[in-house]
Amino acid sequence: MAATLLAPGDHHLKAVPHLRDVMTMGRLLANLGAGFHLEKNQAILNCSNITDYEAPYELVRTMRASVLVLGPLVARLGKAKVSLPGGCAIGARPINLHLMGLEKLGAAITLESGYVFAKAKKLKGASIYFDIPTVTGTENIMMAATLAEGKTFIENAAREPEVIDLANALISMGAKIKGAGEGIITIEGVKKLRPLKYTIVPDRIEAGTFMTIAGVTGGDITIKNCRPEHLDALINKLKDAGIVFKSAPQGVRVIGPEKLKAVSVMTMPYPGFPTDMQAQFMAMMCIAEGTSVISEKIFENRFMHVAELRRLGADITIEGGTTATVRGVDRLKGAPLMATDLRASASLIVAALAAEGETTIKRIYHLDRGYEKIEEKLKKLGADIRREKEE
């Protein structure tokens, strides 16, 4: 959606879920002067008349990915004013690498009153090295570089499937990009891009969440429109835990065992174990046989779900803020819980499905940022789940 800012005209995106984050990005683009309409999982955007270049705090604070308008705005308009981002409270997640990359491309960057100001008469290609792989940083610089003069090289680029998908979308607009999904991405700038017509890659984290649900319930779930090759690290760990995978038409069949086995994991940049699956995997390990050690190497403050899992009877201890030891228990018992962020809220649903009795989860607005009507999908699988209005 941010990439549509790079070209005037009507853009058509297919396979767009009805999520709170999608609507937030739609409002942000509308605030900049774009037209936005979402119907039946197709988004139509018109970016012919981008009249503003400011992404205000009240929109950016709810979703960190709003910062992705920074690169396209500077590339197309030569200026951008973007609030420093918010989103989930899972650590600082600074955007210093985004700003470093834009400076290398020739943008003048200033920070003032909680906003990033970026200006450039014309971006010029450069060699950019990221100290650590950053998904949104790679995406922001890749988008900006499509309209820069000359060649840009992004070294130690993020390799996530979402980065590859964005590169493919940009290529369909006329961008010249090579190496997406590898360590070095090369972008040769072009004078202009055409409108985007693209079908977006399926959400691997939503698919992974349902895989853990099959594991924790001993269920048998067929997940359609899923690309298992995007989840190799997770699937290998789930197999170690006793979960069986079988190929199915247009997807994968996931069969949970009678008793899960404890498996240790360490989150890493792709193709390693995804940090966005850590909480759901931990919920599953709460009733596994044995002891597992879960190490979080991507974000600080990403164990906020632990206190809530303990309320269900989980036996978890945390050391140094980045390592959790989970000793499997025979059963969990339902309790009132509070969601703290997007993936934590999903982990509480995973655990609640395995717990005896009733569990109530509050602050589920976090859930709606990344899961489309998850309760309806779970009902189809036989879950006793309902959504109630929060007081």
Image: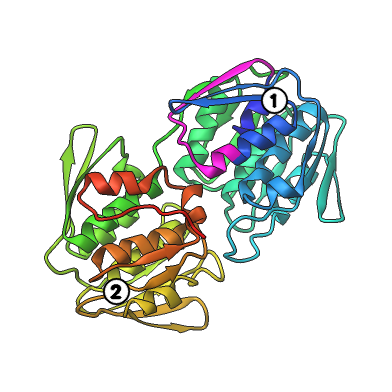
Element type at mark 1: loop
The residue positioned 76% from the left and 27% from the top of the image is 76
Residue 232 appears anywhere in the view: no
What is the number of callouts on the image?
A: 2
> Is residue 175 rendered to the left or right of residue 111?
left
Tell whether label 2 touches label 1 (CB within 8 Å): no
Residue 28 in the image: x percent, y percent? Answer: 68, 37
Label 1, label 2: how far apart the Cα atoms are: 46 Å
Instruction: Name above or below for residue 199 compared with residue 56.
Output: above
Instruction: Name above or below for residue 343 compared with residue 18.
Output: below
Residue 175 in the image: x percent, y percent? Answer: 61, 23
Q: Which mark is residue 34?
A: 1
Quadrant of res 104: top right
Q: Split into 4 quadrants, where in the image is the N terminus? A: top right
Residue 291 in the image: x percent, y percent? Answer: 27, 80
- Most foreground residue, 183 or 268: 268
Which of pointers 1 and 2 lies earlier in the amino acid sequence?
1
**Residue 323 in magenta?**
no
Magenta part of the protein: which range? 8-23
Q: Amino acid at mark 2?
A: Cys
Residue 14 in the image: x percent, y percent? Answer: 46, 25
Residue lying farthest to the left in this orientation: 258
Q: Amino acid at mark 1?
A: Ala
Instruction: Name above or below for residue 37 compared with residue 81.
Output: above
> Is residue 291 rendered to the left or right of residue 323?
left
Quadrant of res 280: bottom left
- Most foreground residue, 6 or 232: 6
Q: Which mark is residue 286?
A: 2
